[in-house]
Amino acid sequence: MRPAVIKVGGGLLGVPGALEGVCGAIGTMGRREPVVVVPGGGPFADAVRALDRQLGLSANATHWMAILAMDQYAHLLAERIEDAALVEQSGAVGGPLAAGRVAVLAPSRWLRAADPLPHGWHATSDTLSVFVAVALDASRLVLVKPAETGEEGVDRCFGSVVPPGLEVRVVGWERFVADAGG
């Protein structure tokens, strides 16, 4: 069975109850189908953005620092989602999924090996989630945001990398929780 890829926006950390609701819904989904979670960057990436504004970092430095920020959020999500396993490489996803667990991707090692994304703030974890969904032949990609934004809430690169045939939904966290039955 092909996995669903769920990108969990880091902005959820600033919304009371959102992280708990989404993590609970993902745990519920993981009991019904294979699920791979891609973390956003949230406040971890915001710290990188602030340093970039202050110090004028290169696109290469900010790219890798933001990817490492996603790893930090992945550790938090793996701790909060019931029966989740942290994975660091594409080849490691299958084990947890075969065991009925949710795979939470800490993407830095995988991306160091592949590096398919442009370096710059125009390509964020939204675009990275497309890369993951395609690489894993996902059944669908769901981007969970702090509020309903539709496709207007994704990064500038996102629309240019979504392949035909990939089902994509961009939803606010409350709708995601309701739809997932969490």
Image (spheres, rainbow, N blue to C red):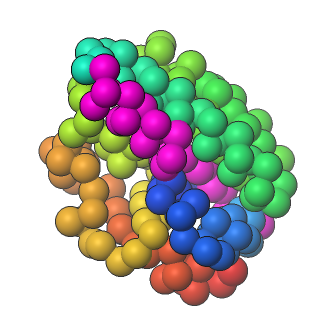
Q: Is residue 5 left or right of residue 145?
A: right
Counting from the top left corner in percent of width and height, residue 69 is at 53, 34
**Eyeballing the image, is 114 above or below 139?**
above
Q: Residue sitting at 28 percent across and 31 percent down? A: 53
Q: Residue sitting at 64 percent across and 42 percent down? A: 74
Counting from the top left corner in percent of width and height, residue 157 is at 20, 43
Q: Is residue 177 left or right of residue 81?
A: left
Q: Is residue 95 left or right of residue 4?
A: right
Q: Residue sitting at 59 percent across and 79 percent down? A: 177
Q: Which residues are magenta?
A: 31-55
Asked whether the viewer can see residue 130, the reply is no
Q: Nearer the viewer, residue 85 or 60?
A: 60
Counting from the top left corner in percent of width and height, residue 146 is at 45, 69
Q: Residue sitting at 46 percent across and 37 percent down? A: 47
Secondary structure mostly seen in the magenta stretch: helix
Quarter of the image that includes the N terminus = bottom right
Q: Is residue 59 left or right of residue 180?
A: left
Asked whether the viewer can see residue 141, the reply is yes
Quarter of the image where one finds residue 152: bottom left
Quarter of the image that includes the C terminus = bottom right
Total residue callouts: 0
Quarter of the image where one finds residue 122: top left
Counting from the top left corner in percent of width and height, residue 14 is at 53, 64
**Eyeballing the image, is 36 above or below 120?**
below
Q: Residue furthest front?
A: 54
In the image, residue 89 lies in the stretch drawn in magenta: no
In the image, residue 37 lies in the stretch drawn in magenta: yes
